[in-house]
Amino acid sequence: MGILDFLIEIYYEIGTYAPIIQVAVASIIFSVIITISMFIYLSVIRYKHQKNINKKNQIRPQIEKLFKDILFGDTIYHEDEIYTEYTKIVGKLSARKIKLAIDVLLELKFNSPEKSRRYQSIVDALRFETYLEKKLDFSRGSTKMKTLQKLQQLDLKSLDSKVLNYAYSKNKELRREARYSHLQLSENDPYRFLDEIKGDLTYWDEINLLKFLKIHNEKNELSNLGKWINYSDNNSLTVFLIKAAGLFEQFDTKEVVYKKTKSNVTSIRTEAYRSLGKLKAAEYESKLIERFFSEKEECQLAIVRSIGLMNTGNAVSFLKKAYLEAKTIALKKEIALVSFTYKSNYNLFEDLKATQDGFDRTIFNHIETQLIKFK
């Protein structure tokens, strides 16, 4: 009996069953067929995916070698030569092959000990901009965000106008990423969105902002942050900008930062006191000393640190008095640390240490050892 005859016999046999059983059998057969079909489909997809991975792994070393020659070799490649050499390796150019080229280029850019000025030649030759522009236009929100990050990493300033389209998106995450991208890519008013930041900055926000400010600073294109420090009504952003002004040693912001030591917000005053030290604003040292004894402890700690950074040698009496009147271990420790490296004709550290016993003496013993590195 052939398979066809067997199936026909089964069909007529099922026809003799009760309707409810026929429905049950039909459902089972349908489910089995669907399950087998899905299994076959997934197996084919898995096979194709693995095949693509294997092919990618085979050609990736060749792409890396080509890109290294272009970026770091003695030969200067023209765009048409780059295109020709790349298509020799991967075949006809497609979106998937452009994505592979971007991944390899970024890996070389950020992991190679050598630096090159030829990244743009690969970007132009393989039409990265066209590919990424289409990804922005026709992809979903999560993919758009990844594309914006790629624009930042490739420093594609030509697509800044496209980025601006998403800077007012209803999607909060996409809007934030677009504004970060604009901060890096724009050559015309890159800080336009600083005064539109609402709510408290997260640590991730601060890391991103600092990264972009650092990029501008390395190019000597960092705008004076005093304007935003002075006029921002977002306390979290103000604290961040004061911190950035100190970190990037924007000496022109000294006066603005000093004004913020009069703020009613403790976190702003604290960061202002701390940044004045980083800015070596010794002209305000006497003002900081005057305010020390009426300030909260976090502000007192910041003042002591700034006095230490200024290191004028004129604050010995203040430091001694501050130590003797300190109420907490944290403040005593900070003053002792500053006195250990404070430059003056008077050895304040030894003077204070000689009068201590018990746990307070331990503070000074600890500071004198290499453990100070782990304070």
Image (cartoon, grey):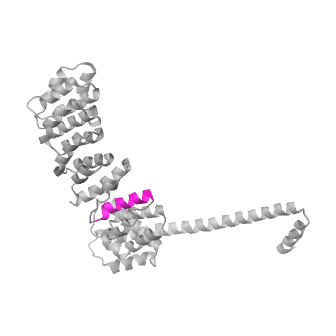
Q: Where's the C terminus, which quadrant? A: top left
Q: Residue at x 36, y 60 (%)?
A: 179
Residue 106 in view of the camera: yes
51 relative to 171 in the view: left or right: right
Name the residue nearer the viewer: 80 or 236. Answer: 236
Residue 312 coordinates in the image, percent (x, y): 11, 38
Residue 129 coordinates in the image, percent (x, y): 37, 72
Q: Is residue 170 above or below residue 100?
A: above
Residue 170 coordinates in the image, percent (x, y): 44, 60
Occupied quadrant, residue 50: bottom right
Residue 188 coordinates in the image, percent (x, y): 26, 66
Farthest right residue in view: 16
Q: How many marks?
A: 0
Q: Residue at x 25, y 29 (%)?
A: 331
Q: Residue at x 29, y 40 (%)?
A: 265
152 relative to 187 in the view: left or right: right
Farthest left residue in view: 345
Q: Is residue 263 above or below residue 218?
A: above
* In magenta segment, residue 179: yes
Occupied quadrant, residue 24: bottom right
Name the residue nearer the viewer: 187 or 45. Answer: 187
Q: Residue at x 23, y 30 (%)?
A: 367
Name the residue nearer the viewer: 354 or 86. Answer: 354
Q: Is residue 225 above or below residue 151?
A: above
179 relative to 226 in the view: left or right: right
What secondary structure do most residues of the magenta stretch adopt? Answer: helix
Residue 349 in view of the camera: no
Occupied quadrant, residue 337: top left
Q: Where's the N terminus, which quadrant? A: bottom right
* In magenta segment, residue 223: no
The magenta-colored residue range is 171-186
